[in-house]
Amino acid sequence: MNSRRNFIKKSAIVGAGISVLPNLTYGFSTKKDKLKVALIGVGLRGTNHLTNLLQREDVVVTAICDVDPVRIKIAEEHIKKHKNPKVQVFGKDDYDYKNLLELKEIDAVIIATPWLWHTRMAVDSMKAGKYTGLEVSAANTLEECWDLVNVHEETGSHLMILENVNYRRDVLAVLNMVKQNVFGEMIHFRCGYQHDLRFVMLNDGKSAYGKGVEFGDKGISEAAWRTQHSVLRNADVYPTHGVGPIAVMCDVNRGNRMVSLTSHATKSRGMHNYIVGNGGENHPNAKVNFKMGDVITSTIETANGETIIVTHDVHLPRPYSLGFRVQGTKGLWEKDGDRIYIEGQSKKPHEWDDSKEWLEKYDHPLWKKYGEHALGAGHGGMDFFVINAFVESAKENIAPPMDAYDAAAWSAITPLSELSIENNGEPQDFPDFTRGNWIKNKPYNWMKGTF
């Protein structure tokens, strides 16, 4: 922690002399020496962000908000361990966050609340003139996706979707390979969120990952709100961990865009079987009908002719995997199996190489420079880089690497997949959230070694 704090202090000084060209900037950009940040939502995810912010010499946490007094107490204990001044606390009711947003001593806001609050809070934050960081997914409906874009354009306030997987070490190394044309012209991608979440979505109401089969009012943490989406929706409700990195690799919203989607869902068995196996056939939740299929598969077509297969699989027993596959005219990478094949360069024709040597060769500049400082930040270091990008972008009030248009396009997979499934896999058209500007927008410089 101390080494990371010292690094951040030094990098903030160095960064003051770095010129960045944003895709879109409103007004004159004057870099702030210290960014005043507030957090709305200090559950497990929000507390992780809080901890990383408190390590920075260029950030002052000014306010926190949560309706759970237990989480407020935990956050305050974290704050006391650092030199950060005492914060203002909000959370008397669901809408007390609006009082937080009225504070003039806030430059930026990070939102890490249950999904149904994401868009409305982000909209209010942008209207209040705050630089807004929003956890994934950013929106639940197409109307909400448009709300994020419209309010960004109306107010000039920036929004960054805090997709940390875009900063995963292997993902950035593969992006480096894509940018250097190692795979040739890009053709096909696979990704998704494949993670057994039954022990998260069902618990004992006492511990976030406790053995149990309760959810809703009797659950705790994500079981209190996330599980209800599986009861009521048949859709890919969590697409951005997979799609975010792939969208960057194929320049979505910046020279390319997603144009159509088809989705299909399997039957639902996993959640019911887990409840019966751990709570018995007579448990009240054994009678709950989970609408969401256990495995949801969506196929996306892009304007430039690539296809992207996205999988949502959280109800069945399985090891964790985002299922990445990046394929071009010269070769491909597959995360499952940790393998790469490049025609004419791999050790043997038609045989896989272990990906380790390739990923080390194309290790991203950010990880080469700052990897040792990032590893304690959470999720293998990804959280350091996503928060660093947010803070540095907010300090200069410039467009972030992943903006409101990305938040809208990536999150739109949820309502579009729901519509497609309801209509027997009927293709759904993606809205063009850039209003045609994807044709001329230039890609963000993901290969620079700053943020």
Image: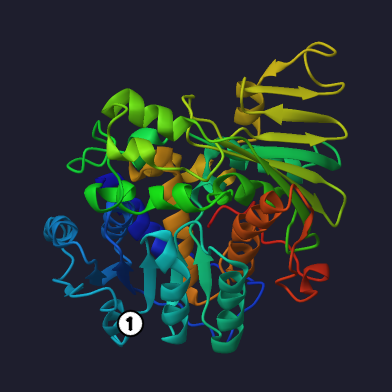
Foreground pick, 229 / 147? 229
Above or below: residue 176 compared with residue 317: below
Write down the quadrant of residue 183 in the picture: top right
Q: Position of residue 206 (x, y in %)?
A: 17, 42
Q: Residues within 10 Å of mark 1 (few under 14, many from 20)?
A: many
Query: On the rendered structure, is 328 left or right of 105?
Result: right
Query: Residue sitting at 13 percent across and 55 percent down?
Result: 81
Q: Could you say whether the residue bearing mark 1 is in a helix, strand or loop?
A: helix
Q: How many marks?
A: 1
- Which amino acid, by three-letter code, is at mark 1? Leu
Foreground pick, 419 / 49? 419
Q: Is residue 17 visible?
A: no
- What residue is shown with label 1? 101
Q: Is residue 433 visible?
A: yes
Above or below: residue 272 compared with residue 119: above
Query: On the rendered structure, is 382 left or right of 200?
Result: right
Query: On the rendered structure, is 251 left or right of 221?
Result: right
**In the rendered view of the protein, which quadrant contains the N terminus?**
top left
Above or below: residue 170 compared with residue 445: above
Q: Position of residue 271 (x, y in %)?
A: 43, 34
Query: On the rendered structure, is 344 left or right of 334?
Result: right
Foreground pick, 284 / 204? 284
Foreground pick, 182 / 109? 109
Write down the quadrant of residue 73 in the picture: bottom left
Q: Position of residue 432 (x, y in %)?
A: 75, 69
Query: Residue sitting at 87 percent across and 21 percent down?
Result: 344
Q: Position of residue 76 (x, y in %)?
A: 14, 61
Image color mode: rainbow
